[in-house]
Amino acid sequence: MEKQDLEVFDDVDFNNEAPRKRPAFITVLAILSWVYVAIGVFSALANSLSSEEAQIEKIDEAIAIYDSMDDMPFLDDSVAVLEASRDNLRVTNLGNLIFLLIEGIAVFMMFNLKRNGFWLYTIAQIGLVSLMIMVMPWPNLIPTLTVCVTLFLVILFEILYAVNLKHMKA
Protein backbone atom coordinates (compact mmCIF):
# COMPACT_ATOMS: atom_id res chain seq x y z
CA MET A 1 0.00 0.00 0.00
CA GLU A 2 1.11 3.47 -0.81
CA LYS A 3 1.81 5.95 1.98
CA GLN A 4 -0.52 9.00 1.81
CA ASP A 5 -0.07 12.40 3.41
CA LEU A 6 -3.05 13.40 5.44
CA GLU A 7 -3.98 17.04 5.75
CA VAL A 8 -4.03 18.23 9.32
CA PHE A 9 -6.18 21.20 10.25
CA ASP A 10 -4.74 22.53 13.46
CA ASP A 11 -6.08 26.07 13.25
CA VAL A 12 -9.55 25.36 11.96
CA ASP A 13 -12.49 25.65 14.30
CA PHE A 14 -14.71 22.66 13.58
CA ASN A 15 -18.11 24.17 13.99
CA ASN A 16 -20.88 24.08 11.48
CA GLU A 17 -21.08 27.83 11.25
CA ALA A 18 -19.99 29.38 7.99
CA PRO A 19 -17.55 32.27 8.26
CA ARG A 20 -19.31 35.61 8.44
CA LYS A 21 -19.07 37.77 5.38
CA ARG A 22 -18.97 41.50 5.76
CA PRO A 23 -21.87 43.14 3.93
CA ALA A 24 -20.86 45.66 1.29
CA PHE A 25 -22.96 48.31 3.03
CA ILE A 26 -20.83 48.10 6.20
CA THR A 27 -17.74 48.49 4.02
CA VAL A 28 -19.19 51.61 2.38
CA LEU A 29 -20.20 53.10 5.75
CA ALA A 30 -16.77 52.35 7.19
CA ILE A 31 -14.99 54.01 4.27
CA LEU A 32 -17.18 57.12 4.56
CA SER A 33 -16.54 57.24 8.31
CA TRP A 34 -12.80 56.78 7.87
CA VAL A 35 -12.67 59.63 5.34
CA TYR A 36 -14.42 61.88 7.88
CA VAL A 37 -12.09 60.73 10.66
CA ALA A 38 -8.98 61.20 8.52
CA ILE A 39 -9.95 64.75 7.56
CA GLY A 40 -10.77 65.58 11.18
CA VAL A 41 -7.61 64.02 12.60
CA PHE A 42 -5.36 65.76 10.07
CA SER A 43 -7.09 69.04 10.83
CA ALA A 44 -6.76 68.52 14.58
CA LEU A 45 -3.10 67.53 14.21
CA ALA A 46 -2.40 70.58 12.05
CA ASN A 47 -4.04 72.77 14.69
CA SER A 48 -2.06 71.05 17.43
CA LEU A 49 1.23 71.48 15.59
CA SER A 50 0.75 75.18 14.97
CA SER A 51 1.27 77.41 17.95
CA GLU A 52 -1.71 78.47 19.99
CA GLU A 53 -0.63 82.09 19.72
CA ALA A 54 -0.68 81.91 15.90
CA GLN A 55 -4.16 80.43 15.93
CA ILE A 56 -5.42 83.07 18.34
CA GLU A 57 -3.83 85.78 16.18
CA LYS A 58 -5.66 84.49 13.08
CA ILE A 59 -8.96 84.41 14.96
CA ASP A 60 -8.35 87.95 16.24
CA GLU A 61 -7.67 89.09 12.67
CA ALA A 62 -10.97 87.60 11.53
CA ILE A 63 -12.79 89.29 14.42
CA ALA A 64 -11.19 92.62 13.47
CA ILE A 65 -12.37 92.18 9.87
CA TYR A 66 -15.92 91.47 11.05
CA ASP A 67 -15.81 94.45 13.42
CA SER A 68 -14.81 96.78 10.57
CA MET A 69 -17.80 95.73 8.46
CA ASP A 70 -21.08 97.55 8.44
CA ASP A 71 -24.01 96.04 10.24
CA MET A 72 -24.86 92.83 8.37
CA PRO A 73 -27.10 89.91 9.26
CA PHE A 74 -25.43 87.30 11.45
CA LEU A 75 -22.34 89.48 11.96
CA ASP A 76 -22.70 89.51 15.74
CA ASP A 77 -23.34 85.76 15.73
CA SER A 78 -20.18 85.17 13.69
CA VAL A 79 -18.09 87.29 16.04
CA ALA A 80 -19.50 85.43 19.06
CA VAL A 81 -18.62 82.07 17.47
CA LEU A 82 -15.07 83.24 16.71
CA GLU A 83 -14.62 84.55 20.25
CA ALA A 84 -15.87 81.25 21.69
CA SER A 85 -13.51 79.27 19.46
CA ARG A 86 -10.62 81.51 20.55
CA ASP A 87 -11.48 81.08 24.23
CA ASN A 88 -11.83 77.29 23.97
CA LEU A 89 -9.10 76.57 21.44
CA ARG A 90 -7.11 74.01 23.44
CA VAL A 91 -10.21 72.11 24.66
CA THR A 92 -11.69 71.97 21.17
CA ASN A 93 -8.50 70.77 19.49
CA LEU A 94 -7.73 68.10 22.06
CA GLY A 95 -11.35 66.97 22.41
CA ASN A 96 -11.83 66.64 18.66
CA LEU A 97 -8.62 64.66 18.31
CA ILE A 98 -9.50 62.24 21.12
CA PHE A 99 -13.09 61.63 20.01
CA LEU A 100 -12.11 61.25 16.35
CA LEU A 101 -9.46 58.66 17.24
CA ILE A 102 -12.04 56.77 19.32
CA GLU A 103 -14.44 56.94 16.38
CA GLY A 104 -11.77 55.57 14.04
CA ILE A 105 -11.13 52.61 16.35
CA ALA A 106 -14.87 52.00 16.67
CA VAL A 107 -15.34 52.00 12.90
CA PHE A 108 -12.46 49.53 12.56
CA MET A 109 -14.16 47.28 15.09
CA MET A 110 -17.46 47.45 13.19
CA PHE A 111 -15.58 46.81 9.94
CA ASN A 112 -14.38 43.60 11.58
CA LEU A 113 -18.01 42.84 12.55
CA LYS A 114 -17.59 43.45 16.26
CA ARG A 115 -20.77 44.76 17.90
CA ASN A 116 -18.85 46.57 20.66
CA GLY A 117 -17.60 48.94 17.99
CA PHE A 118 -21.13 50.28 17.56
CA TRP A 119 -21.35 51.24 21.23
CA LEU A 120 -17.89 52.81 21.17
CA TYR A 121 -18.92 54.72 18.02
CA THR A 122 -22.04 55.95 19.83
CA ILE A 123 -19.96 57.18 22.77
CA ALA A 124 -17.57 59.01 20.40
CA GLN A 125 -20.49 60.69 18.61
CA ILE A 126 -22.07 61.78 21.89
CA GLY A 127 -18.69 63.16 22.95
CA LEU A 128 -18.20 65.14 19.74
CA VAL A 129 -21.67 66.66 19.87
CA SER A 130 -21.36 67.39 23.60
CA LEU A 131 -18.03 69.13 23.03
CA MET A 132 -19.61 71.24 20.33
CA ILE A 133 -22.52 72.19 22.58
CA MET A 134 -20.21 73.02 25.51
CA VAL A 135 -17.92 75.42 23.64
CA MET A 136 -20.41 77.21 21.38
CA PRO A 137 -22.11 80.44 22.46
CA TRP A 138 -25.85 80.11 23.10
CA PRO A 139 -28.38 81.33 22.05
CA ASN A 140 -26.90 81.90 18.63
CA LEU A 141 -28.13 80.96 15.17
CA ILE A 142 -24.83 79.69 13.74
CA PRO A 143 -24.12 77.12 16.50
CA THR A 144 -27.77 76.07 16.44
CA LEU A 145 -27.60 75.32 12.72
CA THR A 146 -24.21 73.64 13.10
CA VAL A 147 -25.43 71.38 15.90
CA CYS A 148 -28.64 70.54 14.01
CA VAL A 149 -26.76 69.50 10.86
CA THR A 150 -24.23 67.54 12.93
CA LEU A 151 -27.00 65.80 14.88
CA PHE A 152 -28.76 64.90 11.64
CA LEU A 153 -25.60 63.27 10.26
CA VAL A 154 -24.81 61.54 13.57
CA ILE A 155 -28.31 60.10 13.86
CA LEU A 156 -28.26 59.05 10.19
CA PHE A 157 -25.00 57.13 10.58
CA GLU A 158 -26.13 55.67 13.92
CA ILE A 159 -29.26 54.31 12.23
CA LEU A 160 -27.30 52.98 9.25
CA TYR A 161 -24.83 51.19 11.50
CA ALA A 162 -27.64 49.94 13.78
CA VAL A 163 -29.42 48.35 10.81
CA ASN A 164 -26.29 46.26 10.31
CA LEU A 165 -25.94 45.11 13.93
CA LYS A 166 -27.47 41.78 12.94
CA HIS A 167 -24.28 41.03 10.99
CA MET A 168 -22.00 41.77 13.94
CA LYS A 169 -20.95 39.53 16.81
CA ALA A 170 -20.32 40.57 20.39
Image (cartoon, grey):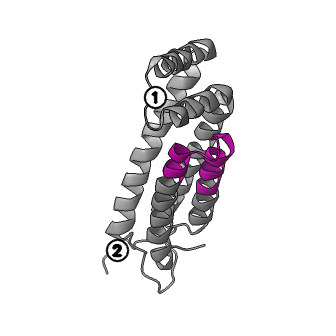
How far, Cα to Cα, is label 1 from label 2?
91 Å
**Number of other residues with Cα within 10 Å of mark 2, as a class: few under 14, some 14 to 19, many 20 or more:** few
Q: Quadrant of residue 55?
A: top right
Q: Main secondary structure of the magenta part?
A: helix
Q: How many marks?
A: 2
Question: Which image quarter is the C terminus in?
Answer: bottom right
Was residue 164 drawn as part of the magenta stretch in this picture?
no
Q: Quadrant of residue 138?
A: top right
Position of 130 with respect to 32 (left or right) is right
Q: Residue visible at 65% across and 39% down?
A: 95
Q: Residue visible at 65% across and 33% down?
A: 94
> Which residues lie in the magenta part?
125-147
Vertical order, 87 against 33 (above or below): above
Vertical order, 1 against 132 (above or below): below
Front position in the image: 75 or 19? 75
Amino acid under disc 1: Asp
Front position in the image: 112 or 26? 26
Give the residue furthest to the bottom. 16
Vertical order, 146 against 113 (above or below): above
Q: Residue visible at 39% across and 45% down?
A: 35
Q: Nearer the viewer, mark 1 or mark 2?
A: 1
Was residue 137 drawn as part of the magenta stretch in this picture?
yes
Tag 2 residue: 4
**Number of other residues with Cα within 10 Å of mark 1, as a class: few under 14, some 14 to 19, many 20 or more:** few
The percent position of residue 58, horizontal first and vertical second, equals 51, 16
Tag 1 residue: 71
The percent position of residue 117, horizontal first and vertical second, equals 57, 62
Amino acid under disc 2: Gln
